[in-house]
Image (cartoon, helix red, strand yellow):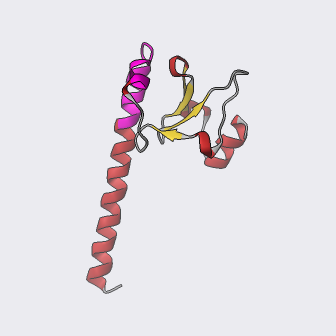
Amino acid sequence: MNLETYLETNNFEKKDLTILFSVGCVLNVKNGDTYPLMADSSIDFSDDERMNIVTDEFDQYWFDQLGFGEEVVVKDTIENVKEKLECVKECEWLESKAELAMGI
């Protein structure tokens, strides 16, 4: 899948992607997904190459290799994605409580 197809299919914009040159990947700052940069400068958007900085395990070496300014982008992304996940979990919990109260 190429960049345009990825953006269109997943409803993202180019500004949602940040290249992390020091670790050879692209970070989607909206959802925390990372994709490898290939030797020809393309991005491998295949699902089997995707990793998420919040839900998947990255070793300390990966974080240590982040270049100047990249660690800030990664930390901000982790915080924002975790905040969204917590909000979704809270909304689901509230929905289940309402359904129980209404006998649904």
Is residue 89 shown above or below 48?
below
Q: Is residue 73 magenta?
A: yes
Image spot of residue 75 (x, y percent): 36, 29
Q: Does the magenta stretch include residue 38?
A: no
Image spot of residue 15 (x, y percent): 56, 31
Q: Identify which residue is drawn at 44% across, 18% down.
A: 65
Q: Main secondary structure of the magenta part?
A: helix
Image spot of residue 79 (x, y percent): 34, 37
Q: Is residue 6 left or right of residue 30?
A: right
Q: Identify which residue is drawn at 61% across, 32% down.
A: 14
Residue 37 appears in view? yes
Image spot of residue 49 (x, y percent): 60, 39
Front one among 29 and 64: 64
Residue 12 appears in view? no
Q: In the current view of this chain or complex, which residue is farthest to the bottom?
A: 103
Q: Identify which residue is drawn at 33% across, 58% down.
A: 89
Q: In this view, does 46 lie to the left or right of 59?
A: right
Which region of the structure is painted magenta? 61-78
Q: In which quarter of the image is residue 97?
A: bottom left
Q: In this view, does 32 lie to the left or right of 98?
A: right
Front one among 97 and 22: 22
Q: Quadrant of residue 24?
A: top right
Is residue 86 shown above or below 69?
below
Image quarter (top left, top right, bottom left or bottom right) of the N terminus? top right
